[in-house]
Amino acid sequence: MTTKAEFNAEEWATLAAGPMVSGLAVIAADRGGTVRETFALAKGIAQEQQEGDKPELVQELLGERPSPKAVLGGDEDKVTRAELPNRTDQVLREALALLEAKATPEETDAYKQVCLDIAQRVGERTKSGDFLGIGGERVSNEEELALDRLRATLGL
């Protein structure tokens, strides 16, 4: 079992940022429903933590609130919507490298799945292309592309 003590503060901040940037990547993919999707991101992280069927390391990471610097990089005011997918890839690659070096394969797999599950919940929060709540898609094409990119980055 891997513990927080095995990571320095910067490494821990990177790990804690993973679930958040995963959801933000989906929010940024499509302009519709941003407020609802932001609430879905917070709720999704809380729900993942409450499920409690994850390794202790992942549970502890879900309880962290990552700093804007860890999520958005050095100069958080400069990250644009267009740059967020690349920032997401960067954070997730760094996090996975840390986990592969220090955590068990089960912990690493659980982390990957949590990041994807949170992003999926965000994507499913609002419909696009509907009229007065009728029809439309649960996950827009842009959001599905963002989810596909996350799957590729996470190796899922």
Image: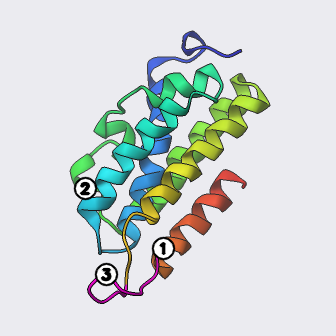
Q: CA distance from mark 2 to mark 3?
A: 36 Å
Q: Is residue 77 left or right of residue 37?
A: left
Q: Indicate the secondary structure of the residue bearing disc 1.
A: loop
Q: Quadrant of residue 80?
A: bottom left
**Magenta run includes residue 70:** no
Disc 1 and disc 2 in contact, CB within 8 angstroms = no
Residue closer to the observer: 90 or 60: 60
Amino acid type at circle 1 is Val
Question: In this view, which residue lies farthest toward the top?
Answer: 5
Amino acid type at circle 3 is Gly
Tell me, for residue 139, which label it has, or none: 1
Residue closer to the observer: 99 or 109: 109
Location of residue 123 with respect to 55 vertically, above or below: below
The reply to whether residue 11 is visible in this rendering is no
* Magenta-tinted stretch: 129-139
Of the 4 image quadrants, the one containing the N terminus is top right
Q: CA distance from mark 1 to mark 2?
A: 28 Å
Specify which label sits upstream in the sequence, 1 or 2.
Answer: 2
Q: Would you name the residue on which mark 2 appears?
A: 78
Tell me, for residue 133, which label it has, or none: 3
Disc 2 and disc 3 in contact, CB within 8 angstroms = no
The residue drawn where x is 46% and y is 39% is 47
Specify which label sits upstream in the sequence, 2 or 3.
Answer: 2
Location of residue 84 with respect to 106 vertically, above or below: below
Q: In front of the other: label 1 or label 3?
A: 3
Q: In front of the other: label 2 or label 3?
A: 3
Q: Indicate the secondary structure of the residue bearing disc 3.
A: loop
Residue closer to the observer: 35 or 155: 35
Q: CA distance from mark 1 to mark 3?
A: 14 Å
Give the image location of residue 16, x and y in percent: 46, 32
Q: In front of the other: label 1 or label 2?
A: 1
The residue drawn where x is 30% and y is 54% is 38
